[in-house]
Amino acid sequence: LAPLAAFGWVMGTHLSLYPGVLIIPLILLLGNGPDAPPRKLFLQRRCSKGGKNPSSDSSCQEEELFNQSKLPITFSWKPVIHFLFWASIWSVYVLVLCGISVKQNGGMLEMFKSTYGFILTVEDLSPNIGVLWYFFAEVFEFFRNFFLIVFHMNILVMILPLAIRLNHRPCFLAFVYIAISSMLKSYPSVGDSALYLGLLGWFVFELADLQFSFFLFWGCVGVSLLSPVMHNLWIWRGTGNANFYYATAMAFACFQIVLVVESVSAILNYDRKLRKLSVTKPVDGKS
Amino acid sequence: MAETEVSKKRKRPIVRLAVLLLSHSVLVSVICCTAGVFGLLLLPVLAKNTYISENALMPGSASSMLSNQEVSEANKLIKELNNLHSNPLGATTESHGIIAKYMSNLGAQVNNHKFHPQLNQFHPLHFFSGPDSGVMQENSTRSLYGINTVGIIRAPRGDGKEAIVLVTPYNAVKGGVRETLSLGIAYSVFSLLTRVTWLAKDIIWLVADSQYGEYAPVAAWLRDYHTPAFSNLDSLNTETCHVGNNNFESKISYGIRRSGTMAAALVLGVAYGNENEDTLGIYAEASNGQMPNLDLINIVHYLAVHRQGLRVKVEQFHWLLNSKWVKSLGEVFESLGKMVKTLNPDWKLGISAADYVEGAATLASSLYHQALGVPTGPHGAFRDYQVDAITLEFSLRISFDRLDRRNDFLLHGGRLIEGVIRSVNNLLEKFHQSFFLYLLTSPSKFVSVGVYMIAFALLVAPLPVVAASLYAKTLDLNPTSEKDKSATSNELGSVLQSWKWLNSVKTVFVVHFWGATVSLLPYFISQIPDSDPTTNFSVWILLSILSLEILRWILVSPSSHIYGLPQGEWAILKSATISSFFIGLGLMSVINFATAEIGALLMVPMALMAHPLKLDVRGQSLRSILRMICNLVLGVISFPPATFFVFKGVIEGFSGIKAGDFWNWVESLWAWNSATYLYIGMVHLPCWVLCVQILLHPC
């Protein structure tokens, strides 16, 4: 499992820089085991059922379910180190192959500049469905580096808090990372949105109570139909300008943000509901 | 309990307002719809007088320089053209040779432009691409060609970067005095402009060969003008042409000479009229409801009325002028205006009944022609390249054979054109000051987009409100049913309950896909050789019904009824229908506002009022019976062919209607790449089918 995961991660990061943040959910997934149930809930079921797990050595009381002094660590580092080893092998392999093939075109430095450097420095400002091109068309040269740092930190800053909050659900963490990076990356496209919308089906039970799902759906349909019309009005007919097209891009970003926020809150509500059920059930079972 | 208190404190005023709106959605929709219709009827009262926005134009501030000398030269040209007695095959080349000779005698640069007229093609998706993606078909239409003669005056003091274009469509094959008179006016102006000192832009005079229609030569010339082709076609294009009787051998070289960007274009035409005075007709609509800048129309109107004494008219619907209810509405508005004036003399909302009737007839015609999306003259070709252009049609009282009347006409018409060119000559930038989006209620009154958008917004505003309230109602129905289900299927059932709306959305998408299929069917039907419009129309209807049944059988699964509440399912379907219709209307209002306005007038009442007939029959109250009758009437009228036939019958009488008329009308829409055709096929028709499905819903 680990070599395959390492290969996928290395290829994803090599092709476009942003799947690199998926290393965190990967590590969590490999460390906990791919089929592990969410850790906090597993803890409570185990405690309430009264020590089914042989690896625990502490007696826990049913009344104090939230005060656990000794958490049995089920996180094993061995698969993670295995994964990192394989990731380094694959990345060295890919870089060597690239080095051989780009030797006559300027070498590795040139390759890094034109691929990762291009993504990071946002050189080309053609209109796309993202929100970056308009900003960088207006920014003064003096402040360009500052704004570059701000926009890239926008994604990086969200990694750690999400990892802390959602570390018991690494698959959903991966989904949220993909959603955020496809929205805020420097050159987004509709294909990136298609990737995470497809992954939405993975959580269809957990996201059953997604609020505003109807409104979000019709909003997305409306914006995706309006966007080519505004583009035509701007470029071909000449009766619109860039603001029309950028307004649809902003509306699209708004809908994506609402989707991400609502899905995270829906997952957390689902976890709370499960926790409540797992607390009340043994009480009912007992009495 | 603590949580509910906290949540109550957190409800902000905007959430409370939204909840209030949703709970009174019926009242809101009735008020908004009536306000929208009332706003539309009020538009002729709200029209403002036109004014020249661009200060540089200054129309009529210089005295006209056209004199009888130019008129007599024009008479020479007219006489020579009328005396051509050749067969139709040589008529074009001979007449164009004469015109070219006269042009080059004046000192202008002449070139001939050869074009191949493109026959009507079916490409409705042309809207999403540029105007020049129509490639010349080399093999099929090689035999048919036309020749445009173009003369260019280079401005002595200008830099050659801008040009003003005069277009005169001329059908040499048909001939006649009327055709040559427009050439006479243009020639008199052209000859004057070779001698003036104030010219800052180049003047291009295009004599378009209109034997294959007036629009095609202009569009072909514009396409070749704007797409430079770097090849040695020039050497291949010189041909020797022999004309039988006169042994008139001339080497005609084809090519294209260019000047610069076009500031404005005027298309001239002359028509026989039976008016009481000399009139000038202005046609402004281009494809997809685009209009030229209002300043261009303002200049022409000002100069025609205040300098040349012509009467200006724009198209009107004559059947509205005679209709009784418009007259009574006009009287109501007149009395309302008087009442408002007594309240506050500063408010000038008064309008006389006759003015209202005229304004309403012109407004309806303006709205209809913009909504069709078909250009009303050859000036439409210019709009694709963002050049403002209008068509001017002169019509005189008596026939043109009397020489003194003809000279008078040439003088006045020529002075008008010279005045317009002099004004446009003053421009430093393109027309940008005045409005691009407007409706005319008379040649000197207009309604701008900021005013007519309000009526449309009021009409369309109930749609999202009703959709949201229906969806909220079905959500409220869910918790009561959960208690009925057993505990084991609770989780699965509740999950599928909250995603239940996906079934209705699937139905909506299937119907829209069917709508797209129906829009594409005429391409295949028109390939059937030798079929008359009635057969085509009936084949189209049969194939549409067949495809609808096939799609329904394949794609809509019967399993959706298992988890659905019988009460709530039609409500979700109606909510989804209204949402998709709202999105379609919004999109169309960006593309062509007039189509969206007429489409909303026809379809919004039906979409809002749709209610299953079975429930109404069971209801048996006055309200439900009224609603049932309204639904049935609206359901019949909103069907696009039915609307067409009803209106045609009301306007022209029910005796002469044939089924093929609808096919001809739709054919004109798709032949001109009008987005209205796509709207009818992909927004109006699917919404109608879905509303009928709601009406016939088995509960």
Image (cartoon, rainbow, N blue to C red):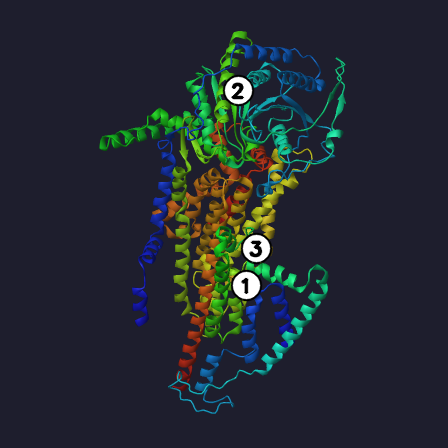
Residue B227 as seen in the image, left or right of residue B57: right
- Subunit of label 1: A
Q: Element under label 1? A: helix
Q: Position of residue B70 (x, y in %)?
A: 55, 12
**Residue B460 visible to the viewer:** yes
Q: Position of residue B612 (x, y in %)?
A: 44, 51
Q: Element under label 3? A: loop
- Subunit of label 2: B
Q: Amino acid at mark 2?
A: Thr
Give me the residue at 44% from left, 76% from top.
A274
Where, quadrant-wise, is the C terminus of chain B in this rendering?
Answer: bottom left
Quadrant of the image occupied by residue B327: top left
Q: Element under label 2? A: loop
Q: CA distance from mark 3 to mark 1?
A: 26 Å
Circle number at residue A196 = 1
Q: Position of residue B690 (x, y in %)?
A: 50, 49
Q: Badges 3 and 1: C-beta atoms under 8 Å apart?
A: no
Q: Amino acid at mark 1?
A: Tyr
**In this rendering, which labeled residue sits more in front, label 2 or label 3?**
2
Labels 2 and 1 within one chain = no
Circle 2 residue: B197
Residue A96 as seen in the image, left or right of residue B342: right
Give the crowd class for mark 1: few <14, some 14-19, many >=20 residues within 10 Å: some
Q: CA distance from mark 2 to mark 1?
A: 67 Å
Circle 3 residue: A123
Q: Residue B535 versus residue B119: which sits nearer the camera?
A: B119
Residue reaching furthest to the front = A142
Mark nearer the N terminus (3 vs 1): 3
**In this rendering, which labeled residue sits more in front, label 3 or label 1?**
3
**Residue A1 visible to the viewer:** no
Q: CA distance from mark 2 to mark 3?
A: 50 Å
